[in-house]
Image (cartoon, rainbow, N blue to C red):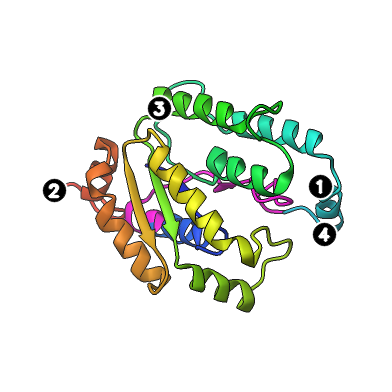
Amino acid sequence: MRLFFIGCEYAGTTTLAHAINAWGREKLGIQFSSIHDHWKLPHMIGHPPDLTPAEQEQVLALSPKILEAFQRHNLYYHTPTKPDDADYIIIGHYIEDTIYAQLYYGYGQEGQAGDRLIHSKNIENQIMKYTPQIVLIHVKAAPEVIARRMREHPHPHSLVRPQDIELVLRRFDEEFKRSIIPQKMVLDTSTATVEETVAEFVTKIQPYLTLQDRLRWLMPPGSTLPV
């Protein structure tokens, strides 16, 4: 099962990815590798231990030229170069990098060195060549819900500004619709709990299950073949 989560900051991509990771481990015995979430600067590491506060400040002080080069390598490092059916969760990747780079990071504009529209197309074509089973999941929430979460639970080094919420939501929607990945779903977390959203995911993922996924569904952890 290969899952690709995208969505505006505060929509719940990271929370939901971790919840589905736990569900997969408990219900299907899936051992996802690390959840790859590297495109909300300064959190470019994304795996424990995260950067220290001092290191995060150092990242934020880097020039757009250096950030672009580092994140371009980060993008391609997480892009398949051969067929791969391993279980995998990634958050944001080239879609998030394109949106946030153009809005906040100072790189990736059309015609600039490191034009993210060009790199996004290249990366997505490579994904479709080697991992066509991947499922694109757009996690979204209403603008007023994003704004409330932003006020009540602010992130350190939050990216999205309150005045940009509707713009960022629209950009994720545009990129979701533009993507050539055919397996897609939308999960709206505006009023649903994490548990309810996981249950919705379980229903919506059914048409996209691979043969390996279906076999695991039939033989969950702890089950045995009849003798």
Residue under circle 3?
Answer: 128
First-in-chain label (3 vs 1): 1
For the view shown, which residue lies furthest in the left direction?
Answer: 227
Check disc 3 and give the amino acid type: Met
Q: Return the x and y of residue 72 as percentages of the image width and height.
A: 67, 31
Q: Return the x and y of residue 83 as percentages of the image width and height.
A: 42, 23
Assign a secondary structure to mark 4: helix
Residue under circle 2?
Answer: 226
Q: Is residue 97 left or right of residue 223?
A: right
Q: Quadrant of the N terminus?
A: top left
86 and 207: which is toward the camera:
207
Residue 59's label in the rendered image is 1
Seen at 33% across and 50% down, the residue is: 185
160 and 214: which is toward the camera:
160
Residue under circle 4?
Answer: 53
How many marks on residues?
Answer: 4
User: Which residues are drawn in magenta?
Assistant: 24-49
First-in-chain label (3 vs 2): 3
Q: Return the x and y of residue 122 as percentages of the image width and height.
A: 52, 24
Check disc 1 and give the amino acid type: Val
Seen at 38% across and 54% down, the residue is: 24
Residue 122 versus residue 189 in the image, above or below: above
Seen at 66% across and 48% down, the residue is: 103
Seen at 37% across and 59% down, the residue is: 187
